[in-house]
Image: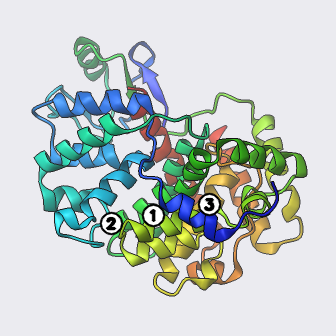
Amino acid sequence: MPKIPVEQLKPGMKLARPLLNSSGMVLMAEGAELTEARISKIENMGVDSVFIDGPSRPAQPKEDLLNALDRRFAKMEGNPQMSLIKKAVREHIEAMYG
Amino acid sequence: MGNMDPKALRSRVENISNIPTIPSVLKQLSTIIENPKISLNEISHFVSKDPALTTKILQMVNSALYGFPGRISSVNHAVMLLGLNVVKGLLLSVSVFEIMHKAMIGLREHSIGVAIASKILAQKKGLKEPEEVFVAGLLHDVGKVILTLVYPEDYDKTVKEAEAAGISIFEAERNHFSETHAAVAGWLSEKWHFPKKLCDCIANHHRPQVSTLAPLETAIVHMADILVKARGLGFSGDNLVPEVNLKAWETLGLAEADLREILKELEDSVEQTEEEFRA
């Protein structure tokens, strides 16, 4: 889940983690859908950024991650279990880029 | 240096009395201990994220001193049994007396990843104490920290050798020390009176087929290690994914869809944990 700066929040986004005040009280529940009103409430709370549902994009380019994946599995060619694990990780990485 | 005598290695390892922790942890820990409103959950959550600190705390609570020899295998359990103030005191003494050493860069991230993946797998397999498997995951590579501490130059050479030869770190360790980090951590876990299942898990995470006391838990940590290495989270001494043991694979019986689900859950948790670390 990406951490989104308050100024980039848009109505329709959903909180991936509950929003707490400094004493740990829940101010907005996990899964709450953002509205204009809620966004300005978050702004007024002095929060910098919040966790939003959805995949976050890694900092490195996808190709780099996939090449590194190939290198890590270089010695496992032809092993059926390892090929399955590699395939799952490859799909997982691809899903992170949407 | 060639092959080391395993007995000499073992006695050397068993006679170190301190495990290093990371300086920033000390700072975070003081902040936590100074906070009068800290809850039991927050404190055990904090401790559970640091392998060296967890080891030290479990070592202490499992020593005869506290009257629970070998029974406490998770920080949560320790906090519940001992109470907040005792645990705070332990934490503080641990951190103050801790010798700071430079451990392997990325090993903490790797260990946290394996701990989280172990817990996810444990829950998926319906284990009653996923928290204990979390601890086993957190500590599975503590032998590497110990080897770097006891033999800094040799271990550095071993890491470089693994990279140059394109072999795994545990093969390079075996060439150099005649034993691996898993065995080293196993000896120490026994010496510290960790629960036997936890010792079994840690000592056999590279050969889960020999585990007799905790075959499922050991298969879980073995698999968690592979998944975290496959995903490339952190660094644990080499950049190769070790081969999954067939028996462990069959014990767990995971399909491709399960693996993807676990990876997704792992990714989210690791991301949150790293946020917390930076905060």
- In the image, residue A91 sits, relative to residue B20, either above or below, namely below
Image coordinates of residue B178 in percent, x first then y, are 73, 66
Q: Which residue position is annotated with label 3? A: B181
Query: Tags 1 and 2 in contact by the CB under 8 Å rule?
Result: yes
Of pointers 1 and 2, the one earlier in the residue sequence: 2
Q: Which mark is residue B136?
A: 1
Name the residue located 56 percent from the left edge and 75 percent from the top edge. Answer: B219
> Which of the chains bears the disc numbered 2?
B
Q: Which residue position is annotated with label 2? A: B73
Question: Toward the viewer: B11 or B210?
Answer: B11
Mark 2: give few (<14), some (14-19) or many (20+) Cα within 10 Å.
many
Name the residue located 19 percent from the left edge and 34 percent from the top edge. Answer: B33
Instruction: Using the rendered view, name the quadrant where residue A43 is placed.
Output: top left
> Which of the chains bears the disc numbered 3?
B
Image quadrant in which the C terminus of chain B is located: top left
Mark 3: give few (<14), some (14-19) or many (20+) Cα within 10 Å.
many
The amino acid on which the numbered mark 3 sits, given as a three-letter code, is: His
Image coordinates of residue B108 in percent, x first then y, are 52, 43
Secondary structure, mark 3, is helix
Instruction: Using the rendered view, name the quadrant where residue B21 is placed.
Output: top left
